[in-house]
Amino acid sequence: MITVVIASRLREDRLDYLTAMHASLTRQSVPWEAVIALDGASSDRLPDPLAQDSRVRTLALPRPVGAACARNLALAHVRTRYTNWADDDDEFTDDATSVRLNILESTGVGWCAGWSEDLHHGSTTLWRCPAPPGRHEAGDVWMYWKSPAATIPIGPTTILARTDLVRAAPMGGLVQGEDYCAALGVTSLAPGILLPLPVYRYRKHPGQMTRQDAYDVLEPEARRHAWNYGGSLRAAFRARETSAAAGVV
């Protein structure tokens, strides 16, 4: 029912984190698959627990292409109804897939998300996204992102969505902030439900992309692009609905 898509360069300092991500998947009560896009890395470096798990498939890319491109290319290898993006240094909570899948199957919405936790050394801190819990109509999540500099409205990796929606609104063409576009795209295409419980753990460590010196250089422009993208999508769909209601072809 569910495929988790991960991009990784299998860096030495992240292999233990990737193994922990895999371990969090093995604790799920819902059948799952994982597609790992190896961004210019050799599959020989894949940790043994993943290499020996038949539920884990790899897409070996011949050269580094960046996380956004690697993730998008991996989408062609998804063969389940639902898809969840994930990072190679994070984890899922134990009931992350079951609670969201149950909502998707019982309500027929296109996506279901939750809160996330910042994962520190032995402790967690809950992060409640600006979008409130409950049902959100297509395009409404963007309204909770007040400006490009404000906190993003929903956690991209907390979203479990229909695969057709993910393929229609994949990662944005950015070197960072690509997942902002993915989250706004999916939530603009279909109604969904945000649950008031954590489903994802975002690991805090020195090797995070967001902790690197160069991160802040492009972040304002990446955010501005994603914010404009979400707003333009919402406006386009609202204009189409207005035209349809007025009988304009």
Image (cartoon, rainbow, N blue to C red):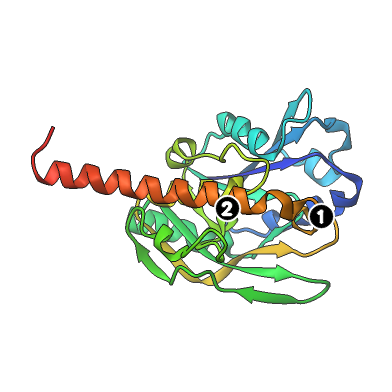
Q: Whole-percent x and y of residue 76?
A: 56, 29
Report if residue 31 is visible in the image: no
Q: Nearer the viewer, residue 132 or 114?
A: 132
Helix, strand or loop status at disc 1: loop
Q: Badge 2: how crowded within 10 Å, few (<14), some, or many (20+)?
A: many
- Residue 4 horizontal side relative to residue 237, left or right: right
Q: Give the label on residue 56, or none.
A: none
Q: Whole-percent x and y of residue 68?
A: 64, 38
Q: Residue at x 58, y 70 (%)?
A: 198
Q: Residue at x 15, y 42 (%)?
A: 244
User: Which kind of residue does numbered mark 1 sit on?
Assistant: Gln
Q: Badge 1: how crowded within 10 Å, few (<14), some, or many (20+)?
A: few
> Relative to residue 169, is residue 77 depicted above or below?
above
Q: Quadrant of the C terminus?
A: top left
First-in-chain label (1 vs 2): 1
Q: Nearer the viewer, residue 106 or 6?
A: 6
Q: Residue furthest left?
A: 247
